[in-house]
């Protein structure tokens, strides 16, 4: 076997390719982006013609992957945790349809919200949808699990959810990779239409089948090589037992490298209750260490409420944020009333180094947009600007302080419309090019249908900049999209955000705010980072 130094994301991508992947479908979102980028650049993927183009959003990605699975081939869907909300409709229904070719839904959660709006734990989605869930605890497992997940998906005729977190996705380790990748599945026509057409009669039948499968899924989890209890329980009761999952298992191992405490490692769900019961019966107290929300802890408490159980819900571990080896060590010390683990470092904020909040790049076109917008809005009483997800969200911070909300992808336009419905004027929405095609178009259609009194700014930098400069689905199509949605030609404008054009931009914004109906302004200038990259590539080619 060859050894490679890989990010967790890269191990997942390579594992999928070596498992016979035919297509990856994704919308970029930290910390999942590198999976698709690795496949896009991979030689084997290019030789095989593996689909790897970015999708418009996570819902279209999930549905396209279902289409590939329908034809018998193996597909991977990648997204960050909040993207799973966007594709929840097809994701939950995918258990009802089942699969033909293996289908793995890879979701990267972001505890501590390094680049996200919330800390949601995607394992709840797997339980809710009755879909088996895998959670690797190392880069090696991330690589190995991909083939297992595809095989298991085809064996159970269900999609598999694989959940990782930021530290797993973005840390590196040496991974043993196999020499011979598996061949892709052949296309077939074995999908049973009565499973895939979710009329109520078909869906009720499938719901009974999937519900009945849950006992087998739990039995499989109990015997999975990724779920293990070690060392063996001794005679009498141990003082402490530990349940650990995902990256938290590494922290426990770091704190207790030579521990004689029994540790139950969980990396495959549904929760293997028989292993949990065995551990609980052999220990006076159990500490549960898991990254994210108390998913395991709540289930264990619900089934085994009489036992002494500690974790995030009881204060041994912090209720929010990422775990660290130090906080896990403190929890072990608390649970044992000892100092088994000596703290190695302090995660307290430095009193010397000043914090450096993020800011828009020097030369960024968004800067000129906010400068012009702020200049115009000084002329109005109580203007409100509804922002969206992207680099331009930094317009909330000094020196611009230009936006009043940012909730989720696409919310700027619909919130501006709702505010206008409430009587707010001016109501301005600012949204990026990639976000507009992701989730903004339907909101604009609502606004057009009611001729809402809003001004929409689609700040187009010709890329998906926040996640590293991936292709933007609507590039060179925005004027046509807006016309097609019904935006009047005379209230659709394209401007170039540069200081020398400030008079034109401010007058355009002023005119469209004073027009009491739907108007769209598109400031268009390439992201300064992709411009430099493209210039460097062009120079290298000349």
Image: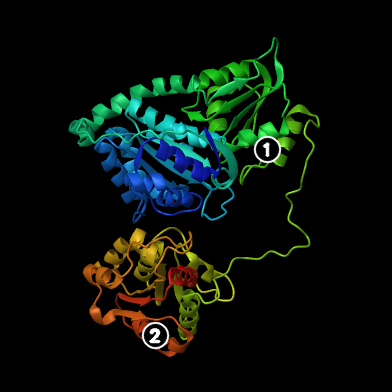
How far apart are the two marked residues, 1 and 2, measured between alpha carbons? Answer: 54 Å
**Relative to residue 23, is residue 395 depicted above or below?**
below
- The quarter of the picture where residue 432 lies is bottom left
**Relative to residue 320, is residue 160 depicted above or below?**
above
Query: In this orientation, does residue 136 appear?
Result: no
Say which residue label 1 marks.
315
In primary-sequence order, the first of circles 1 and 2 is 1
Residue at x 35% of width, y 86% of height: 511
**SS at mark 1 in the image:** loop
Residue nearest the viewer, comparing 344 with 5: 5
The reply to whether discs 1 and 2 touch (Cβ–Cβ < 8 Å) is no
**SS at mark 2 in the image:** helix
Query: In this orientation, does residue 395 appear?
Result: yes
**Relative to residue 369, is residue 239 depicted above or below?**
above
- Residue 510's disc is 2
Q: Would residue 436 be found to the left or right of residue 350 on screen?
A: left
What percent of the width, then of the height, locates residue 266?
55, 28
Which residue is the extreme one toward the top? 235
**Dividing the image into 4 quarters, which one contains the C terminus?**
bottom left
Residue nearest the viewer, comparing 134 with 513: 134
What percent of the width, then of the height, locates residue 102?
34, 34
Residue at x 34% of width, y 25% of height: 155
């Amino acid at each position: 076997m060859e050894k490679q130094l890989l990010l967790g994301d890269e191990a997942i991508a390579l594992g999928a390719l070596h498992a016979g992947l035919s297509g990856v479908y994704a919308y970029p979102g930290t910390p999942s982006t590198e999976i698709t980028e690795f496949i896009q650049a991979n030689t084997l993927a290019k030789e095989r013609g593996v689909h790897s183009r970015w999708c418009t959003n996570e819902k279209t990605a999930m549905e396209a992957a279902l289409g590939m699975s329908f034809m018998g081939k193996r597909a991977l869907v990648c997204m960050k945790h909040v993207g799973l909300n966007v594709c929840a409709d097809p994701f939950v229904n995918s258990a009802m349809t089942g699969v033909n070719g293996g289908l793995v839904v890879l979701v990267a959660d972001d505890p501590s919200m390094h680049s996200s709006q919330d800390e949601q734990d995607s394992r709840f989605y797997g339980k809710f949808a009755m879909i088996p869930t895998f959670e690797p605890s190392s880069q090696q497992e991330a690589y190995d699990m991909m083939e297992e997940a595809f095989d298991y998906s085809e064996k159970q005729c269900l999609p598999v959810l694989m959940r990782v977190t930021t530290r797993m996705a973005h840390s590196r380790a040496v991974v043993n990779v196999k020499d011979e990748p598996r061949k892709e599945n052949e296309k077939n026509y074995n999908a049973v239409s009565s499973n895939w057409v979710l009329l109520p009669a078909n869906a009720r039948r499938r719901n009974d089948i999937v519900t009945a499968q849950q006992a087998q899924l739990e039995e499989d989890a109990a015997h999975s090589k990724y779920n293990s209890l070690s060392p063996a329980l001794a005679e009498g009761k141990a003082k402490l037992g530990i349940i650990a999952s995902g990256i938290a298992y590494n922290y426990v191992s770091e704190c207790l490298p030579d521990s004689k405490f029994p540790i139950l490692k969980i990396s495959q769900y549904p929760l293997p209750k028989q292993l949990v019961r065995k551990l609980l019966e052999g220990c006076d107290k159990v500490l549960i260490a898991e990254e994210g929300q108390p998913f395991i802890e709540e289930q264990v408490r619900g089934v085994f409420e009489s036992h002494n159980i500690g974790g995030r819900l009881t204060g041994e571990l912090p209720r929010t944020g990422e775990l660290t080896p130090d906080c896990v060590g403190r929890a072990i010390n608390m649970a044992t009333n000892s100092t088994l683990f000596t703290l190695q470092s302090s995660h307290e904020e430095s009193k010397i180094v000043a914090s450096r909040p993020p800011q828009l790049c020097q030369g960024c076109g968004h800067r000129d947009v906010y400068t012009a917008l702020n200049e115009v809005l000084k002329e109005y009483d109580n203007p409100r600007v509804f922002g969206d997800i992207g680099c331009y969200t930094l317009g909330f911070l000094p020196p611009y302080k230009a936006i009043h909300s940012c909730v989720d992808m696409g919310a700027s336009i619909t919130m501006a419309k709702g505010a206008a419905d409430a009587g707010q004027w001016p109501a301005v929405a600012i949204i990026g090019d990639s976000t507009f095609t992701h989730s903004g178009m339907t909101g604009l259609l609502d606004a057009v249908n009611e001729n809402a009194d809003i001004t929409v700014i689609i700040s187009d930098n010709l890329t998906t900049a926040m996640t590293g400069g991936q292709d933007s689905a609507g590039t060179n199509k925005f004027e046509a999209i807006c016309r097609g949605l019904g935006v009047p030609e005379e209230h659709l404008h394209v401007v170039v955000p540069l200081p020398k054009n400030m008079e034109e931009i401010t007058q355009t914004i002023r005119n469209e705010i004073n027009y009491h109906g739907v108007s769209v302004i598109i400031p268009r200038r390439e992201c300064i980072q992709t411009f430099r990259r493209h210039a460097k590539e062009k120079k290298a080619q000349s």
